[in-house]
Amino acid sequence: MLPRRSRLVPPIARGELTAALQALRAELDLPAAFPLEVEAAATHAAETVSADTVTSGLADLRGIEFLTIDPEGSTDLDQALHLERTASGAVLHYAIADVPAYVTPDGPVDAEARRRGQTLYAPDGRIPLHPPVVSEDAASLLPDRDRRAYVWRFDLDEGARPRETTLVRAIVRSRAQWNYHDAQRAIDAGDAPASIAALEWFGHQRAERERDRGGASLNLPETRVVAEGDGYRIEQSEGVPLEDWNAHVSLLTGMAAAEIMVRGRVGILRTMPPADPAAVAAFRAQTVALGVPWREGVPYGDYLRDLGRGPLERAVREYAAGLFRGAGYVAFDGAVPEEITQAAIGAAYAHTTAPLRRLVDRWSLVVCEALANGREVPAWARDSLEALPDLMARSSQKASQLAAGALDRVEAALLQGREGQVFEGIVLRQSGDGTRVQLTDPPVVAKVKDLDAEPGSDVRLRLASVSIPDGTVTLVPA
């Protein structure tokens, strides 16, 4: 399915939008350039940390034909994979960028990364977690370059269940950089490299394992702002199947990391409580009202996986998103917490595959590698674990505020000058502060007050006013 794309923001609105996006950064107190001492420390690390198999003392895994699969244009490449089918299953190697090698504990880069928490994404440019000399060069798993990595090895059975898991630090060399759409086209054409072609088998098998453990994948259409020339547009896409299959590689690795940390009784997990039974009952009733009933006896995850991609199903997914709440991090050292499950995944889980872009993953890698190889967890990692949940919660809140605020302002800019026009849309869900409606063109989602319409119904709305500085769009029933 081709993505739905809006028109470019009209030239008359671009200057006001630029100012509004800058004001949003100031309002959220987001970091700008890296301090000089941070840049200097990162440059020193990039120049002095060895990626040579002899001087580093690391395993030489350059003979494995790794490749990367990321969104088009990515330069901060956290992961590279090699997947080889065998007579009884497969062997998966998953290389994760060795960020700990380039970040000295309690040094300038570490302190700044803790302040930032994660890479933040905005239409007018991302705000990286680490200086680009590390995140987009020295530590990034770019093709045709020797790179340090934490390498997970999974011996998988025919159902893609891990029979044996190991984790070592090594030197690797990626052979190619793929984006999702080119890789999917190669799969469909039958000429994809073996590792990419095998992801279809892997993805389907891991989806079945998700079904076995009662997990649920909620794949909402991705809405993002795309910079194009000197303007912006909104793009809404269901993605390609390969994205789901590739996501299962990270999910498998995160579950393996959690298992290692729980067994070792030290680490940090990503958790989510089960949905409230009353909310689940309300969701079931809503699916009946929409004409897409979740029938008794059908597991929740199975229902979501089997949903189609029409407008009514989109309304169901929007409603289901309300059940996926309360995610957070729990750190432990000694006693393992009582509640360690990530309810949507249906298992204990840890963030460990994106250390270039997310702070907590650096700790997960260091802890897991030590435990997996029978060594003591480094004191710096152990002593700072308890600070991570609050650091990540603050940065996640900033990321959500930035994403929502930027999208609101771009949507307002797209609609400026069209006041009085009537737009068609579909009602997604009702909430206390208004009814969420997805416009057909442009692909804008707006809240409409005083709209009495059931989820899934078609509506016609008149644009009353827009305000780019605060991202306000006022629509009224036509």
Image (spheres, rainbow, N blue to C red):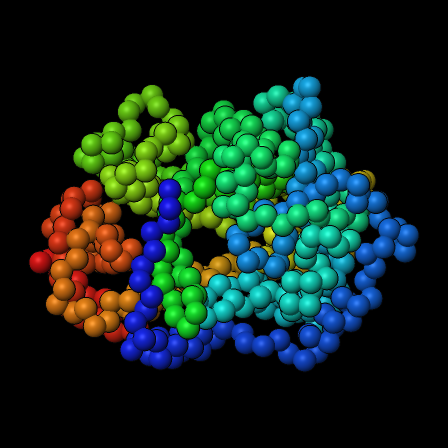
The residue most toward the right is 54
Pinpoint residue 340: horizontal percent, then vertical percent.
55, 40
Instruction: State left or right for residue 272 relative to residue 446.
Output: right
Query: Picture quarter containing residue 133?
Result: bottom right
For residue 251, say whether it is visible.
no
Instruction: Name the residue at 71% across, 59% down.
Output: 139
Name the residue nearer the viewer: 9 or 205: 9
Q: Judge whether 170 appears above or below 297 on screen.
A: below
Query: Picture quarter containing residue 166?
Result: top right
Instruction: Name the residue at 84% across, 48% down.
Output: 58
Name the residue nearer the viewer: 401 or 151: 151
Query: Picture quarter containing residue 231?
Result: bottom left
Q: Judge whether 363 appears above or below 105 on screen.
A: above
Q: Judge whether 38 appears above or below 268 on screen.
A: below
Pinpoint residue 221: horizontal percent, then vertical percent.
37, 47
Name the residue nearer the viewer: 393 or 414: 414
Pinpoint residue 172: horizontal percent, then vertical percent.
76, 47
Quarter of the figure with the C terminus? bottom left
Instruction: State left or right for residue 258 relative to residue 23.
Output: right
Instruction: Name the residue at 66% across, 41% down.
Output: 81
Name the residue nearer the viewer: 186 or 146: 186
Quarter of the figure with the N terminus? top left
Instruction: Name the residue at 36% across, 52% down.
Output: 236
Number of disc labels: 0
Pinpoint residue 150: horizontal percent, then vertical percent.
73, 47
